[in-house]
Image (cartoon, rainbow, N blue to C red):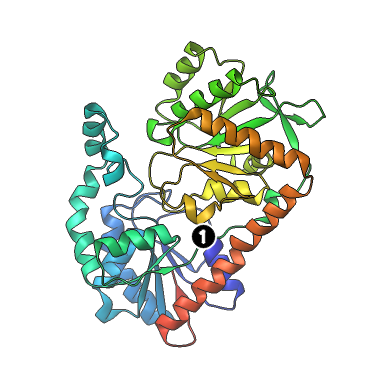
Amino acid sequence: MHVIEGLRAAGHDVHVLTTPADGADPSVHAIGDSTGGRYSLRFFRELKREAVRLCNEHDIDVIHAQGFAGIPLTFAQRRLPPVVTTVHGTLWSETPLDRRVRRTRSAGEGIADLWRFKHRFAFAPLWHLWLASRPQIVCDSRFTAKELKRIRRSLRPVVVPLGFETAPFLAGARMAFDPGTRSLTERTATSPPFVLAIGRIERIKGFDFLLRVARALRNSGDAGFQFVIGGEGPERSRLVRKIDAMGLTDRVHCVGRIGDDELAKWYRAADVFANADGGHPAFGLANAEALAAGTPVVATPNGAHGDVVSHGDDGKLIEARDPARWAAAIRRIAAADSRDADRRRRRASRAAGRFSRDRMIARLEKVLRRAAGGETTLSR
């Protein structure tokens, strides 16, 4: 919706083809039989026909497609205006089937991964055929652009970093974490520092490694660092049992899913955001959100993390191998922030400039105008 609202604010007439959703906006045209943004076979069957109809009725100059939806539209190019497709990663880069992740998985996990992502195997021939057609592609990180060019050297993807409304992440008083209530509370001079980690709780996300980091911090005589893990997932029960077995129940707290309306408060309250993701994310939105809240990030160098987190005031990128090294980085970065009261504000200000919604819209608009060859009436 950020893209749609931004393009409309820039004066464009935008029509949207999407899965059924709530709302009565006459420019939003629902197709398919699934909800919540999930594609279905019916959606793809109806997509080309409805796109042709909309283009004929509204004199549309360019189509901006998201992900897999761009494939049938690109192949229907003779009946449609230029199609620009935004992709968020490659077919495998955000899954455990990524070539760099497969070797870290057990045999049982590997079989489960194959079953879980079997639809991507079925889709792979069509995806590679689409890439061979040299479609116009936008991606949100240099990492994904490099991955696409590795697969097909003739591609010329354009990088438009993801943007969002950054202002709410620094708005309001900074709170603290209360281990007793496992909730946010008023910050005082004696509030314990805490490390925040957010994500789907599964092994590839690196939460097991963060437990070792928490233990290393405790064993090093830290200032009482607490770890807060926000999220749900298939591994949550096992992770809670492991926290107990490691004797970390007074240090590590699984607080469940944090609602979208509460995320900014938690990012802002944290002393450090930790992201030990063992996969290769196409962007790493959580890192950008933490920085927008002024919170430093310690993360793996995987995927597009390096596109988001710069060494220095932003934090540090470290392989998830040595818990003591992570513990030392967390201690050092948190201490630097405590000595410089303005450091968090400067960090947030940089992130607001890099990841603003307006900047993303302006760069995307430029790509779409170029594809259309001039003034545009946009369809998404």
> Quick one: label 1, few (<14), some, or many (20+) residues within 10 Å?
many
Q: Nearer the viewer, residue 138 or 122?
A: 138
Question: Can see residue 70?
Answer: yes
- Where is the C terminus found, in terms of image quarters? bottom left
Residue at the spot 75% in from the left edge and 35% down from the top edge: 175
| Location of residue 341 with respect to 188 vertically, above or below | below
Direction from residue 145 to residue 194 in the image, left or right? right
Q: Nearer the viewer, residue 286 or 336?
A: 336
Direction from residue 207 to residue 112 in the image, left or right? left
| Residue 330: % across, % down | 60, 35
| Residue 57: % across, % down | 40, 80
Quadrant in which residue 296 is drawn: top right
Residue at the spot 38% in from the left edge and 75% down from the top edge: 54
Inspect the image, locate mark 1, and give the three-letter code of the amino acid beneath it.
Leu
Direction from residue 245 to residue 359 in the image, left or right? right
Q: Nearer the viewer, residue 282 or 11?
A: 282
Quadrant in which residue 100 is drawn: top left
| Location of residue 368 with respect to 260 vertically, above or below | below
Pointer 1: what residue? 162
Element carrying mark 1: loop
| Residue 112: % across, % down | 25, 32
Question: Can see residue 356?
Answer: no
* Outermost residue toward the right in this view: 189
| Residue 262: % across, % down | 65, 40
